[in-house]
Image (tube, coloured by chain):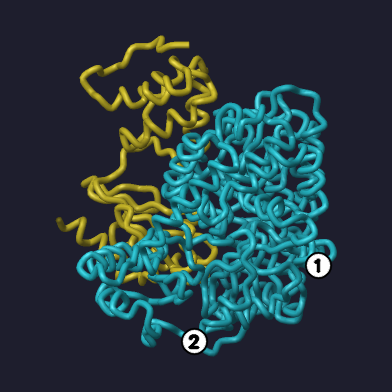
Chain colours: A cyan, B yellow
Amino acid sequence: MIKEELNQIAAEELAAQSQFEHRVFVCTGTACVAANGEAVKAALEGEAATAPEHRCQIVNGGCQGLCANGPMVAIEPEGVLYQHVQPGDAADIVAGLGGKPIKRLTDKATAPFFDRQTKVVLGLSGKVDAENIEDYIAHGGYSAVLKAITEMTPAEVLDEVTRSGLRGRGGAGYLTGLKWNTVAKEGSDHKYIICNGDEGDPGAFMDRSVMEDYPHRIIEGMIIAAYAVGAQQGFLYVRAEYPLAVKRLGLAIRQAQKHGFLGNQIGGTSLNFQLEIRMGAGAFVCGEETALIASVQGGRGTPRPRPPYPAASGVFGQPTLVNNVETFASIAPIIEQGAEWFASIGTEKSKGTKIFALTGQIVNTGLIEVPMGITLREIIYEIGGGIPNGRAFKAVQTGGPSGGCIPAEYLDTPVEYESLKKLGTHMGSGGMIVMDETSCMVDVARYFMEFCMSESCGKCIPCRVGTAQMYDLLTKITSGAATVDDLAMLEKLCEMVSSTSLCGLGQGAPSPVVSTLTYFRDEYMAHIVDKRCPAGVCKMTEAIPAS
Amino acid sequence: MQQSIPIPHPEDKRWRLVVGTMRRHGFASDALIETIHTVQSSFGYVDTEALSFVAGNLHVPLSKAYGVATFYNYFTMKPQGEHACVVCLGTACYIKNSGEVLRAVSEMAEIKAGETTKDKKASLLIARCLGTCGLAPVATFDGEVVGKISPSQATARVKEWLES
């Protein structure tokens, strides 16, 4: 595959598409399918077939972001977006193509949800056919790969990624350029790349959406990474719980192979790169890179002490680069548009954009991509549309089971790696769960502790035993049986488990407790002293009646 | 590498799928998880007979194969019921009361999460997160995702299975 061939594929695909005046994208993501999306697609296809004069093509679209208002239908090139579409609307939609948008299917109130976003990683996600590489190429796909491998040296690619300021989107925020450089410097002639698609955070589905709707974007990033660090083999580690993502990535790999983007002598250069899928099997700890590597090798996903870091000794003892889905998906735009452009988005230390799964007690639940530095208030009240049912905001949880809850007084905090850390939570992979006054913060802390306790791999004692003890103490508090001494013990355990556990799972497990204790200590005291749950969630079955 | 242990029940074609996965990976030991995935998708669950077969052919100790099969939540060592209801307990679902949905189904069907009814008609399972948080609370019925579900809707669906 050389540039001229790529241009030809793009030209042919665009010519084929030009026979259609309109492309109608029906979201076939999990949420929209649950809302009857498949039937909507079938109805639209039926209408399009009976009325060929409208020259419209019905395409398997991807997530448009606003999952709560599905099924969603996007019409290009008009840029019209219909919400809550039902099969009965198909006739009107097809008949109305090219005319004014149908009022009953649009919702002005949700305009800020779309207008306030900056789509860099998601790019055209949802507006190209995820199962068609030609469509992706026609919209500029794979040109970044060819640019990198034919016009740039590996050192220049490394430099570009470093200067972009991109940081790992899996949560820890390690500088991607630095990681790539470390792997590139390793002397081994056999290196590996792993894309971590084991999105295990409950309440997060950013990576699922990228893998389902934009699989080629990830593969493109991995090929560029392979070129830059000198790797020959890659693994895409995907959760088995995401069958559609597994299917589409598999298809994308086969298409990329067919077009010579994977395999030997990619783009007529000496670059050889093979890519295969490894399915996860439901273990949260596999998000930790050493556990992930153990799992890729077919074993139990248990972490090991670092150093040596995977960059020096990873898969089969060879240097290995591990990056998250969103990190790899950020690479093509950086190569295409340059490090300076990417670095101009965001703040001084957190560059670019971040995808969040905005869920919980909020009007517009869904998937958003925003520039770093946007405030939590802007996300929740402008993009998210605020809290439904006139209830009051209580907290927003970020960072999953190793994150924390941010109260109302810090809503004006900009979303950056450092600022969130200061508040006792972290960026995490992008779950953002909004809670209102009906949520009990002690119960939320107990929920996350139950999660960490069940997901602890059992290798190190502080995590295995500590999380169980903390869970018991939190259960005691939420059932009204705890004393002030129990609270003191809980705080002591938080410190012990976080400072002595082997990996991030144990080290982060106390975080939801610590953050809720910092901001909502009064709720803990109400449970312990007054034997009362202020939110009315906990049943207080063990409470001793006051004598 | 090649197949070293013969298929235990040659008349059952499902074993060929298992061999196929191992062959695709050259019977390398790192194909253990991939192969167990095939066992589960072909047979519905993973038992010790299948594990011995896989372990022998991939040249890993049975203890390691058993360790892997029991370590990961996705694998089940017990046969499942005819139908399966999975209630999501991810954070977004939890704060929207999916716990109540689980409790209602559990009380109605008289089984705990992870169990199957005595007549083998229905299994009740929990999921950590189905990634459909926008529709919380969510449950699946034989794979069909149902969003914004209420406890009574969920019990009605399972009751249908039990009475069929």
Q: Secondary structure at mark 2?
A: helix
Q: Which residue is mark 1?
A: A347
Residue A252 in the image, given as x and y percentages of width and height: 48, 43
Residue A377 visible here:
yes
Residue A525 in the image, given as x and y percentages of width and height: 70, 75
The amino acid sitting under disc 2 is Lys
Location of residue A168 with respect to A70 vertically, above or below = above
Q: For the point 59% across and 78% down, which residue is it?
A: A115
Residue at the extreme right of the image, as rendered: A348
Q: Chain of mark 1?
A: A
Mark 1 and mark 2 residues within 8 Å of each other at the beta carbon: no
Q: Chain of mark 2?
A: A
Q: Secondary structure at mark 1?
A: loop
Q: For the point 35% across and 53% down, which residue is it?
A: B124
Location of residue A38 with respect to A234 vertically, above or below = below
Report whether A11 appears left or right of A179: left
Please tell me the numbered disc located at residue A108.
2
Dividing the picture into quadrants, the one containing residue A347 is: bottom right
Residue A509 in the image, given as x and y percentages of width and height: 69, 54
Q: Nearer the viewer, residue A446 or A531?
A: A446
Q: For the point 42% across and 60% down, which residue is it?
A: A29
Residue at the extreme left of the image, as rendered: B164
Same chain for mark 1 and mark 2? The answer is yes
Q: For the point 49% across and 26% down, which residue is it?
A: B32
